Image: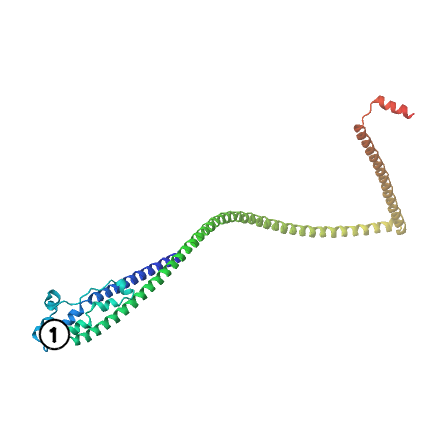
Amino acid sequence: MSNSSTLAAREAALVEQNNALNATSAKAQDEADLILRRGSRPVVGFNGAVGLMEAESMPSDTVALSEPKASLDSPKGGPLPTKRNQSISNIRSGSRADVLQQSPSKAGLRKEGSVAGLSALDARQRDQFATLTQLEEQIAYLVEANKTMERATEKMVDQMDQMKGEYAVLTRKLEQTQVQMEKQKGAQTTLESTFKASEGELAGVHTTLDDARRHEKHAAQSAKAVQIRLDRVTSEVEKVRQELKDVKEQKGGAAVPRVEFDRVLKEVQMLEKQKVLIMMAELMTVYKKQAKLIDILKRQKIHLEAAKDIPFTEDEFAKTLDWGS
């Protein structure tokens, strides 16, 4: 938006400058036209001045020539070369010969006897030519500046068209970006809600974990207390066993000799070992029988499944037996 407003401002400034140049050019043309219109009358006015200057030395019959009004309004002063100027277009084309024709000829002035007026007229014509040349140069400069301004304006218009196209493209891209942003906002809202739900679940998990840690700590303390109690009971049991052993030794020493007691104890231990070995042998025998029975049952199951797949009638089975015999 700032680029388009800047271009519009520059275009307005260029248009104002172009209008100013056109106004200046028109003003210069008007001035040139005015000077050229005046260029047809200075001879009369200047002749009037010359007539005034020469009235003192000229005869009375020539004084009538020095009056401007008489020379302009009535034919008393005689005919004067008062040819009108041409248009400004002829002046711009460089036709200065017509300007020379606008003033009275030197021969006419000589016929009237105004030599001083002729020199003054030449000076006035030179001034007019200089002014006219300067005006022509100004007009040419203004025309060239106007053309340059028009080219710059056209270039600026092309740039504005290009900027308008780029602005349209950027506007479409902005709309697409806004649509994507709306979609991203929706996705972000969904993610935020999911994140909040996850935070709630995480807080619940942390609470459960804290409870589990407290229970674990309590269980560890309870286990430690149980271990302490177990150690105490174990020590008490060991103590009781030691006391019992001491009592047995004391009783055996009084009734039975120590050697006999040891022998009997060894025999008892041996018998217990033999009993354990016999029980283990019986268990192994039972285990083997069970394994053999399981094997037989598996084979029977296989035969039954095969019999289901290939059914035989009793006659066919009998024929099979007859064929086998």
Q: Is residue 256 visible?
A: no
Give the quadrant of the C terminus: top right
- Which percent across, then down, holds residue 319? 87, 23
Vertical order, 228 against 128 (above or below): above
Instruction: Name the residue carrying label 1.
Output: 52
Vertical order, 281 against 83 (above or below): above
Report the residue at 11% width, 66% height from top. Answer: 75
Most foreground residue, 7 or 225:
7
- Which percent across, then down, holds residue 113? 15, 75
Vertical order, 220 against 142 (above or below): above
Report the residue at 22% width, 71% height from top. Answer: 125
In the shown orientation, is residue 190 left or right of residue 265?
A: left
Most foreground residue, 289 or 227:
289
**Quadrant of the image occupied by residue 61:** bottom left
SS for dot 1: helix
Q: Amino acid at mark 1?
A: Leu
Report the residue at 33% width, 62% height from top. Answer: 146
Q: How is the image coloured?
A: rainbow
Circle 1: is it few (<14), some (14-19), or many (20+) Cα within 10 Å? some
**Quadrant of the image occupied by residue 291:** top right
Give the quadrant of the N terminus: bottom left
Q: Is residue 128 visible?
A: yes
